[in-house]
Each structure stands twice: as C-alpha cells, then as structure tokens.
Image: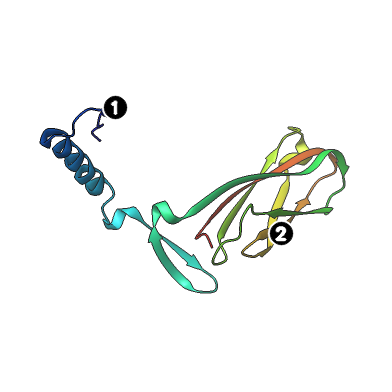
Amino acid sequence: MSRVSIPERGQPLDVAYLSTLALAINSMAEDLSSATYNYTTIDTSSEGKVSCKTSETRMIGGSITVSFDSTVTASQVKSFTYTFPRDFKYTPIVTATPVNKGQTTAGEDVTVVLTDITRGSVTGFVRYNANGQVSTIVNLIIIGIPN
C-alpha cells in the first residue's frame, strides 16, 4: 500500500498532492474489497450459518488454570468457567485444549468437556483419568460475531 507524505504547515495543496491522495485512497479501497475470501462464516447454534467480513469477527485466545500442583484421583472432575471480555451477538464457536503444565503422567491422561457455551462465557470441566500430581491449564479459542 502506498504511503502519502504529510504536508508541511503552510504548504499549498496542489493538484499533484491531491492526485496522490486519491490514488492512495483508491489503492486502499481495492485492498479492502468485498471479495468472498474476505468473509468468515460461523455456523451458530441459534441462527445457523452467519457470514460477515473477516475484519468484523472477534477471536479470543483464552487460558484458564484448572489445577495447580494438585493431587487428583482417577475419574475426578474439576470445573471451570471462562467469561468473555465482551458478549457475542450469537453463541460463538469454542475449542478447548488441555495443557499438561506439570508434565506429569496423570496430567497427560485428561479429557476436557465443554458443558455450556453462551454469548458471554464458556463452562466445562477437566476429567482426570489417572491418579497423581497435576497442573492443568485449558487453552481456549473463541470465534464469533461481536454484539
């Protein structure tokens, strides 16, 4: 994208400078065209498939500590809730990934289940499938349309 130099104070605005401005604006408009690859489609549970410009979607990368240096038993469950900084217009798509922060055997054998996703938060739990010490974090990727 071309850059337009800022005029000096008192500099007369001539045709050449105005032409440079117009070319830069036109170049920017072409870069922001409404081509189909600039759109994102989110298949919402409440409204079905909703498309909007990719620049108008919101993506949040979140992280929540579920346990820190804790002792767990097999089949034990620890719940978590992550609140979004701002509400979404529709229920967003959420992906959760467990992270074995303690790098223990028990921390490797976990299952993450999301139980409720709303426009303002996600709730879920981590089920531990082995006994031992764990430090578990859940990383979240939330994609939706802002309110």
Callout 2 secondary element: strand
Compared to residue 12, the image places residue 130 above or below, namely below
Q: Is residue 7 left or right of residue 39?
A: left
Q: Residue furthest left?
A: 15
Return the residue nearer the eye: 140 or 78: 140
Q: Residue at x 75, y 41 (%)?
A: 136
Q: Amino acid at mark 1?
A: Arg
Query: Where is residue 33 drawn, in percent x and y?
Result: 26, 52
Q: Residue at x 23, y 44 (%)?
A: 25
Q: Which amino acid lies under the numbered mark 2 shown in the image of this protein?
A: Thr
- Residue 105: percent from left, percent from top: 76, 36
Badge 2 density bin: few <14, some 14–19, many ≥20, Cα 10 Å: some
- Residue extending furthest toward the top: 8
Tell me: residue 15, above or below residue 54.
above
Give x and y (percent) for residue 9. Answer: 29, 27
Dots 1 and 2: beta carbons under 8 Å?
no
- Residue 41 sits in quarter: bottom left
Q: What residue does disc 2 label?
A: 123
What coloring was used for the rendering?
rainbow
Residue 136 vs residue 30, the one in the foreground: 30
Name the mark on residue 9: 1
